[in-house]
Amino acid sequence: MRASDDPMAEFRATFFAECEDLLEGAQAGLLAMQHGRADSETLNVVFRAVHSIKGGAGAFALEEIVAFAHQFETALDQLRTGTLQPDAATILLLLNASDGLSDLVAASRDGTSLERGATDATLADLCALVSDGKADENPTEGFVVTKLSLDLDAPEPPLPERQTYRIDFVPDDALYALGNEPLFLFRALAELGDLEVVADIAMVPEIDKFVPGSSYVGWTLDLTTAASDAEIAEVFDFVDGLCTLRIARVPADRALDPVPCPPPGAQTASAQAPGSAPQEGPVGEPPQTRPEAHLPQASTAAPVAATVRVDLDRIDRLANLVGELVIQQAILTQSIADTGLTRRSTVSQNLEKLTGLTREMQNGVMMIRAQPLKSLFQRMSRIVREASAASGKPVRFSTEGEATEIDKAMIEGLADPLMHMLRNAVDHGLEPPGIRAAAGKSAQGDVRLSAAHRSGRVVIEVTDDGGGIDRAKVLDTAISRGLVSAGAQLSEPEIDSLLFLPGFSTAGEVSNLSGRGVGMDVVRSAIQTLGGRIAIRSETGRGTTFSVSLPLTLAVLDGMIVDVADERLVLPVHTIIETLTLSDDEVGELAPGSSLAMVRGQILALLDLGSALGYRAPLETIAGAQALVIALEGNERVALLVDAIHDQRQVVIKGLRDGFGRAPGVAAATILGDGQVALILDPIEIVAHAGIRAAAPLSSAG
Amino acid sequence: MTTVLAVDDSRTMREIIALTLRGAGIDTHLAKDGQHGLEVLEELAPDAIITDINMPRLDGYGFIAAVRDRSQSRTVPILVLTTESADDLKARARAAGATGWIVKPFDPGKLVRAVQMVTG
């Protein structure tokens, strides 16, 4: 069922989306408190967030969330009132609580159940914390979970016997001051049954003694109704304490008596139908003095915020359509060029304007999808906290460039690799406190997560100030696993990039955090799926930086169009360093199917793309072929041989995830200007798949 | 048609209130906190106001006080949304100038009845 078909489902969706925002805000606030960056409003923001989650959860009868949020809220309230002190331990506990609340919310959103007792320990801690301030026996005392239902027209229960009540009602002055109106109370009573109202206006003074806002009129009401005592009392709920009120049942035999002994000057009015008002005494400032004429205003809601929440599906559809538009426009451009019209013709000039508009539209759609990395970064602080606790290494975690925007899909795809990189930074990057102390470093390790725009791409870095990569150990491990031949001479960057080889792990003992079966190879392939690249910089004793470079969006790509064995293919331009035409004397044979070329003093491995993709048998001669030089990690270079290089142009990426098997080296597909479908290749994966690197680690010739 | 201004910082609450009241034929306007509520009141003279207490910028108590301060809205009925039904909360709401209260989570019928109770 689509959410829009079911208002309850829509409310739930709104609620959970709001919960995410609120939890984010709460986490940010608690982190600010932890770092001593909190101001007077910070705690209030956190409190309100938890409070709102509790309120919303109550409406959906999510009792576990309500119970947890209630204790959380109580603790925060005690901080506000000063009953509790915001010391480090308390704030850490509150951070854990926000993690726990976040888990509970996610579990009920996804309809999964948490491991039994997953948040019990945190809840117990919270209760203990709170009870230091004040005992709260019943976790949700004063807060009743009432499941929201939209059954506005519930069938009325069968009518019980009717009763007559005598109600004496004399308002105090305060009743009017607080915006109450006796007339409305009488109307509400009249809806319960038959009502007779007698006003006592004996106390109304002469006009010159009249004090506005004072109460001069009392009423005696006879209500014959099937409603219960409670229902009648409910009518007076808001004025309880603001009036003299007496409600009594009239014995059945007197029920038909008229209202006895009207006070002098009293008049009788029937209020059986709403709108037939009882005698109105001068009651201070009656509601009529309120301006009735509403200023011009649309009958819809007042604008609440300058943002709209849009289903991601809709944006994706729009992005897809704009993609089609770009393609169609390219096709049109090509067919117009084919007719031989000059660039100065009216058609060509108009087409150029259309091209500009299309590009702007494409950028506009991409901007809708762009989101700041903030939420992702905030989630990561929890990962670091958990890793710190599990490894026993104290960590100071900082983030930078949270406002950097990137495609939303990219943010989702980044969560897992970032998580793993941060765990690694704490687990493998940082030294244990003892060793840090011996090295003259503070016991608390630094882990930094940063993001920045750099030449049209987003660069995200995870930096630790640990001991750096132990390259001797890495090399030993790689040799012992047969990943590198013994005695191979590898440069430092080459050794570092061994970390990305499948199955590589340098951890002597498997800790609580690693040993999850995920290595850096998985991180790298996740980054590559996003069109990104990952690199390592490491300095012994000073720390390690993992640097991830990503395109701004997944939807378009600057592509190089090439021909291989009569197939038209696209390679991402950012992977290509240069293009070459090879002449015989530049080429030297190394092994069958693989060759070396010497270009400007540098040795290049040659890879025939046609045979690597299985389009044809290896070329007998590579003389005169065109080559695209691509860079691998660690500055290795490989030249891919192709039959022809066409041009460079933007292509719209059409994912091959649904309905296609994953072919190594094929990243996606696109539709070219002439309507032809072309595969978009991942050259780095093709090279890895061809096994060139394992066969011959390369170094520059002097 | 009865016009109501509902002030709550929770989007979920705002939507629930709006759907419930509009379903009962009440023209419902929304504001996301007290400050925003006061801005809306510059352009709107509602028959009743519903407000949350815990809100950023200007909370419910401050909002009610400001509403009662304006001559145009001195006697407009104000209903407070509260998660606690405790008596001292009612007393505090009343001390701030509220007409009545609705205990969250409310059932829709109760909300509509409460609004009708103060608007007639």
Image: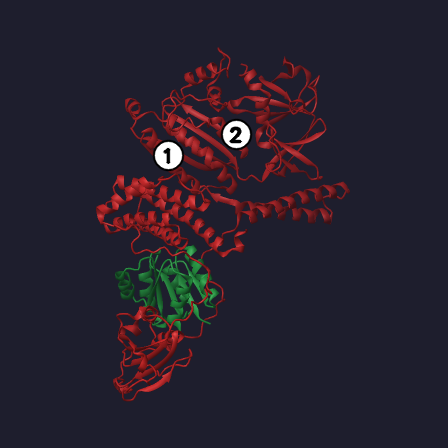
Chain colours: A red, B green
Circle 1 crowding by C-alpha within 10 Å: few under 14, some 14–19, many from 20: many
- Left or right, A47 with respect to A317, comes to left
Q: Nearer the viewer, residue A203 or B60?
A: A203
- Left or right, A525 with respect to A670, comes to left
Circle 2 crowding by C-alpha within 10 Å: few under 14, some 14–19, many from 20: some
x then y, percent, for residue A369: 53, 45
From the image, tell me which residue sits under label 1.
A384
Q: Quadrant of the C terminus of chain B?
A: bottom left
Chain letter of the residue beneath label 2 in the structure image: A
Residue type at mark 1 is Val
From the image, tell me which residue sits under label 2.
A525
Residue A279, image quadrant: bottom left
x then y, percent, for residue A256: 34, 83
Q: Nearer the viewer, residue B23 or B99?
A: B23
x then y, percent, for residue A234: 33, 68
Chain letter of the residue beneath label 1 in the structure image: A
Residue type at mark 2 is Ser
> Which residue: 49% across, 13% down?
A489
Instruction: Name the element at disc 1.
Output: helix
Cα distance in 3D space between marks 1 and 2: 22 Å
Do residues under tags 1 and 2 come within 8 Å of each other at their CB atoms? no
Taking the view exactly as shown, the residue that stands out farthest to the right is: A339
Whether residue A549 is visible to the viewer of this picture, yes or no, is yes
